[in-house]
Image (cartoon, helix red, strand yellow):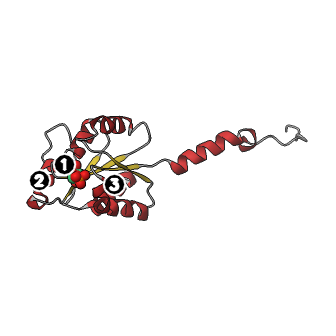
Amino acid sequence: MSEISEEPRPSRTATMPAVEAAFEEIAVDEPLVGIIMGSKNDKSKMQPAGAALQEAGIRFEVRVMSAHRDPELVREYCTNARLRGLRVIIAGAGMSAALPGVAAAHTDLPVIGVPILGKSLGGLDALLSVVQMPPGVPVACVAIDGAKNAGLLAARIINC
Ligand code: RP5
């Protein structure tokens, strides 16, 4: 039997408190879902997605970026999404709603599209833009103004 040492061994947390704290912070703060939308005017329509995620205890972030007005920003955000720890992207847009499809073109994460009801065509414009993706670039599509289901679906993807 080995001798019992007088000096207690330093614990892991005692030797690297700063590193431990930094990792804890990363684990707490890192969002798992990115909610993006084509206009700040889409915010109220997309809010139920955030509410559903919050209820499920899933961290998320919200960004406004248009596939047509800010194509470079969309490319950069979606290209880096997996590296930043995101697991799902929810993308909402109205009218000629290219955002979900463009997001899916720049990431291999699951993308959930939310067609948003605009001022004409009863939202059919956005619905068809989101749902009619060509083979090889998958986008899941919820109902027109169906942001709540987008949040619930993202939670199911993360929890499965
Ligand atoms: C889309 O065009 C947006 O997602 C929005 O739903 C629609 C109109 O944009 P705003 O003119 O309200 O900024 O890109």
The x, y position of residue 67, in whole percent, is 24, 42
Q: Which residue is mark 3?
A: 154
**Vertical comparison of 87 with 58: above or below:** above
The first of marks 1 and 2 along the sequence is 1
Q: For numbered disc 3, what is the local secondary structure?
A: helix
What separation in Å lies between label 1 and label 2 (alpha carbons)?
8 Å
> CB of residue at label 1: within 8 Å of ligand 1?
yes
Drawn side of residue 13 relative to residue 149, left or right? right
Answer whether residue 93 is visible to the viewer in this image: no
Q: Which residue is mark 1?
A: 97
The x, y position of residue 48, in whole percent, is 33, 64
**Vertical comparison of 129 with 152: above or below:** above
What separation in Å lies between label 3 and label 1 (alpha carbons)?
20 Å
Q: Which residue is mark 2?
A: 125
Judged from this view, the residue extending furthest toward the left is: 121
Q: For numbered disc 1, what is the local secondary structure?
A: loop
Query: Which residue does the image show at 35% across and 47% down from the upper left?
Result: 88
- Judged by depth in the image, the label closer to the viewer, 3 or 1, is 1
